[in-house]
Structures are given as C-alpha cells and as structure tokens.
Image (cartoon, rainbow, N blue to C red):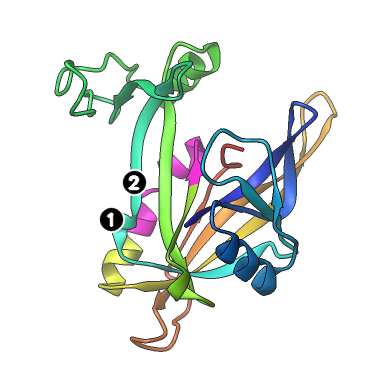
Amino acid sequence: MGRFRAGQQLNGRPVALEAWRITTGDPEVGKAVAELYGGTPQPWETTKEDSLEVLTDTDSVKVIVDGPDAISFRMALYGMVGRPTHACDGVEFTDPEDPRHGQPSGCPATVQERRAAAKAGHGPKPDQRIEFRLADAPELGKFRLMTASWDFMKSLESPWRALEAVGGPALCSLGLELVEFTTKSGVDVAYRKPVLKVLGPAPDKAPALPSLATVTAASAPF
C-alpha cells in the first residue's frame, strides 16, 4: 500500500530526511498515515503509482513483520527502463526470466571489490526489501522499505535469526538513526540510516519482549 523512504529529491538532488517520508497511491492510506504520524498528503513528481507523499513528523514507527521471508535480498544492476539488467545472489543469476538463470554471475569474491564495481557503475548493488504492516493500523495492508545498503547486506543473518526465533508475526520498530563522524580530511558528515529492531512476538500473540536483534541500513533509494 505504500513505501517508507528516508529521503527525497529537491531540485534534482537527493536530500536525507530526519523523519519518515511515506508514499502511496491511495488517498485514504495517505490520510491515515498522516493522522498517525503527522504531515499532509500531497502529490509529488513520479512515474510510479505511489503519487502521493506524506512528510511525517516521526523518525520511528512500530511495525509487524511476518517472519524472515518478509526480508528479501539480491544483487541488482538497473538499466534505463527501470528493470534490472543483472540480478543475482552474488554467485549465480537468479531472475527466472533471464536466460542466464542459474549460471555464474561473475561477481567479484569480496565485498570491497563488489562495492568498487558498483561505484564504477558496472556492477550490481544490494537490492533489499522489508515488507511489514503498521502496528498502529495493520488493516491498512503491507508497506515496504527498500535499501541498497551494504551494511544491511552484511547484517541480514541477524534479523532472519531473530524472526525465526519469534516463530510468527513479530513486533518491530523501524527508525531513522542519526550518524555523525568526521572524515580524515576534517569534513563533518551527518546522515540518518534506517534501523530495524526486532522486539518480539506481535501484540496479538504475546507482549513485546526485549530487543532480539538490531539491523541498520544506509539510506534507502529515494
């Protein structure tokens, strides 16, 4: 029913946000999330169906994740038409419609080499998605967060194990965490990264438990 985003485009440039931006194509969903988290539904320029955006006032929401299968991962390189020209698991091509399906993808062995290839524009990046319902309004349906974070890729095992331990729908928090540091050249850098915390079974199953796992991810695609 919508997407959670950590940034937006302003004057053609990506800008990180301090609170969640939620996009949807359903006016009723836009109104509902605005009432829950602040902001006002308004149109934004896009060719996708989620043509309404809500710039919320909150940097953390409670969500319900229906098990480890709600988190998906692949490596992908997108072409001009918005479809991946390369989709793999880091070892083999995984797109069933690709004639190369099941064949070696040719990706470098190390994360450092993969990052360098992606930065140069000729290698795939992580393409990760989390699907969830809003704990405050699960009846609205499922939402999605998409991220190309390399850090999230390296941390995937942790949420999978935590969700498996819950054994059913899990109550989680999805927040934007501030990161600040100074580079070796003396430049101050600050940004916010999505953080998913698995708290325990969803409320209709049992009260929330102390955090089982924390997963961080760099800013999601705008």
Q: Quadrant of the C terminus?
A: top right
Residue pictured at 28% horizontal, 31% vertical: 89
Q: What element carries label 2?
A: strand
The disc label shown at residue 72, or none: 2
Which residue is identified by label 1? 69
Residue pictured at 48% horizontal, 18% vertical: 118
**Horizontal side, residue 16 vs residue 151: left or right:** right
The disc label shown at residue 149, or none: none
- What amino acid is found at the position of numbered circle 1 in the picture? Asp
- Of residues 106 and 25, the one nearer the viewer is 25
Residue pictured at 80% horizontal, 28% vertical: 11
Position of residue 25 relative to residue 219, above or below, is below
The x and y percentages for residue 181 are: 76, 41
Is the stretch drawn in magenta largely helix, strand or loop? helix
Question: What's drawn in magenta, residue-wise?
Answer: 146-160
In this view, the residue farthest toward the front is 27
